[in-house]
Image (spheres, helix red, strand yellow):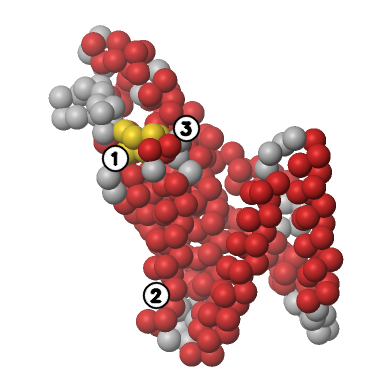
Amino acid sequence: MHVISLSAFDLSLAALLLLLLAGCSFRIGLGIEKKIIISGMRMTVQLLLVGLVLKVLFASGSLYFVMFMSLVMLLVAGYEVWARQTRRLRGSTGYLISTGSMFVSSFSVAFLALTVMVGVDPWYTPQYAIPMLGMLLGNTMNGVALSSDRLITDIYKQRGMVEQRLLLGQSWQEACGDIRRDCMRVGMIPIINSMAAAGVVSLPGMMTGQILGGSSPIDAVKYQILIMFLIAAGTGFGVMTAIWLISRRLFDDRQRLVLDNLTSAKAH
């Protein structure tokens, strides 16, 4: 079975649907029509550029090229997490925490999968390494962004309650323990919902792509199960790491809540 190529006309028809959605947004006053159009244009340009880069990358198979591409993906994902936060840690701390938490989780899980589970040789084969890392980073990014933003916002809003607990002799872990647990749940909800609905409500993207590419449905299912497990683990570890690092920065060594190192996103 060969893959049916899509023409520019086919893509233009799909783009018209997006323009129709933007028109509906303008008509009913949602105010997101500009974001819809800009996001669609940005996605198109980004994917076309990535397609050209991956074509060269797949042809070369160079470890250094793969590592460079992975680093770029990580840095951009870290920025997206940092940019989505309503309130942020001052300076580069918030960016370093989001980037570091995704590096620890996504890269370690991807390396384990490539070397042990999939067993591809060499382990950095671009056709496996880049798509797998991309799926892990994309989902981990969403989980870390949701949980990080929720953590800082909730602690800021409930600072009075947190400080009262500290005055009663609780440690910083105990004073914000409920908030931290709720934020971790928020970060994990998307992937939990995706796993619960996979195969019943929706066919996940990787499985759909493999089937359209001519792979056996059973092989596609096996790979999708593997990817979903990896994404859940990567997202969970990334969320836990980010929550611990951020909450630790909000308290000093004397167990006091420190909020003067926060800045509003509107200031940027």
Res. 54 image quadrant: bottom right
Res. 68 mark: 2
State the separation of the CA atoms marked 1 and 3: 17 Å
Res. 230 image quadrant: bottom right
State the separation of the CA atoms marked 2 and 3: 32 Å
Q: Of circles 1 and 3, which is in front?
A: 1
Q: Of circles 1 and 2, which is in front?
A: 1
Q: Earlier in the sequence, mark 2 or mark 3?
A: 2
Res. 118 image quadrant: bottom right
Mark 2, Cα crowd under 10 Å, few <14 / some 14-19 / many 20+, is: few
Kind of residue at badge 2: Phe
Q: Earlier in the sequence, mark 1 or mark 3?
A: 1
- Could you tell me which quadrant the N terminus lies in? bottom right
Kind of residue at badge 3: Arg
Q: Is residue 229 above or below residue 66?
A: above
Residue plotted at (75% across, 65% down): 208
Mark 3, Cα crowd under 10 Å, few <14 / some 14-19 / many 20+, is: many
State the separation of the CA atoms marked 1 and 2: 28 Å
- Which residue matches tag 3? 150
Residue plotted at (80% across, 47% down): 23
Q: Position of residue 25 (x, y in %)?
A: 76, 42
Res. 111 mark: none
Res. 216 in view: no
